[in-house]
Image (cartoon, grey):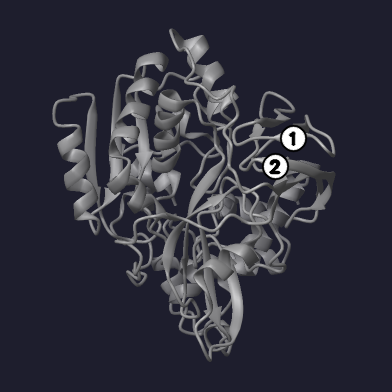
Amino acid sequence: MLNKLKRAALGAHTPHDKATAASKPVPMPLPAQVRILMSQHIGAPAKALVKKGDEVFVGTKIGEAGGFVSANIHSSVSGTVAAVEPFRLSNGRMCDSVVIKTDGKQTVDPAVKAPEVTDKASFLAAVRECGLVGLGGAGFPTDVKLQPKQTVDTLLINASECEVWLTSDTQEMLNCSDDIVRGIEAVLKYTGIPKCIIGIENNKPECIELLNQKTKDKPAIEVKALPSVYGTGAELILIEKCLGREVPHGGLPADAGAIVMNVTSVSTLGKYLATGMPVVSRCITVDGDACAKPQNLIVPVGTAYEDVLNAAGIKGGVELGKVVAGGAMMGPAVENLSYPTTKTTSGLIMLSAAAAEPPQVNPCIRCGRCVEYCPMGLEPVEVNQAYAARDVQELGKLHVDYCFNCGSCTFVCPAKRPCTQMMGLAKAFYLGEIKKGGNK
């Protein structure tokens, strides 16, 4: 499997449906209320700092990081706290949430000001204070990521944005290039990492050209054009494409001498260092065949999906069949439109009833396409057999834990089999058995 990382046939050639690539982000109408979750990141939930009746402003800290691997939460609106109550997450777990009735003024908290950064310690404290997490979808707290135990020689900026429909990262590059460079330079300066590579798929030539221009006098920063193949944005693939290195099995990017940050994450850091405004809003791509006005919207964190969709509208005469949160390939279907956006919400895809209709599933013809197009060089057919037999050792040999549920195997399958769902179940079973100590 590891040798296959060096092959060229990695990842599916998904359609380049980027209708909103030239859609400059615009603020959506302010919702009547927001529900801000205290768990929007990997790690411990934040601890609510406010109570019902409290007045808050844009940028007010309403949640304190609940541990080392955690993140602060800030109010995205000005208004009054209507409730602090439990809320069920999409994974079934419960966490606290803060419901805020907006006052329509969007008054900025007087405490919001640019942080004083003089050394590594104050820099990491500033990153933690602003509540920055991986905005590409993973949600890992950035201050923790920037404190690796291993020696790191490269900061990799993931600007590939290979997901179908999503263009929020593209717009970030086109409109906030100075913030991106400011964030990169701060990371390099205060962490001691000597160089940075910005990886951008070659189907975004305007972004490549602009960032090349912005960094032409900055020898520590390189802009690298990457193949336009779905899956390029995965950390392990990005490291291989940019550095020619492989992350050890079960390891982290830092084990290969790299730290990977999403381009919007590093841009947000650059903005925070200049203004002091923490993570309170997010550019979200709203698109899909049922969307009346595909566009990029600037959305306050905690806005209900329904409010975002209403801002874009549903096409006349079209029945909305499904809403996908995130990209069309990896994003989960939304069960409840009252669910709030989070820091990591990058897109909402509105699919018509016709597009959402599940395809006819046929028997596997063992064509091998799922193997050929898997970005990680895995073998879904063999994994399926091992999972059916509940063979933990065989699943380990097949490296099922490398699967990141990209959806490529299902996308290319001529029999329309739910390969990705099976891989997800197999991976969950394998990791569960390993955690329990199973080896049979």
Of 377 and 51, the residue lying toward us: 51
Query: Residue at (73%, 57%) from the top-left corner?
Result: 90
Image coords of residue 344 (percent x, y): 56, 48
Query: Residue at (34%, 67%) from the top-left corner?
Result: 18
* CA–CA distance in space, label 2 to label 1: 6 Å
Query: In what element is the residue under mark 1?
Result: strand
Image coords of residue 234 (percent x, y): 44, 49
Query: Residue at (51%, 11%) from the top-left corner?
Result: 122
Of 90 and 197, the residue lying toward us: 90
Q: Return the residue at label 1.
A: 55
Query: The disc labelled 1 sits on which kind of residue?
Result: Glu
Q: Return the residue at label 2.
A: 79
Horizontal arrangement in the rendering, residue 374 relative to residue 364 (left or right) = left
Q: Is residue 224 above or below residue 230?
A: above
Horizontal arrangement in the rendering, residue 246 relative to residue 178 (left or right) = right
Q: Is residue 428 above or below residue 274?
A: below
Q: Quadrant of residue 212?
A: top left
Residue 409 in sight in this render: yes
Q: Earlier in the sequence, mark 2 or mark 1?
A: 1
Query: In what element is the residue under mark 2?
Result: strand
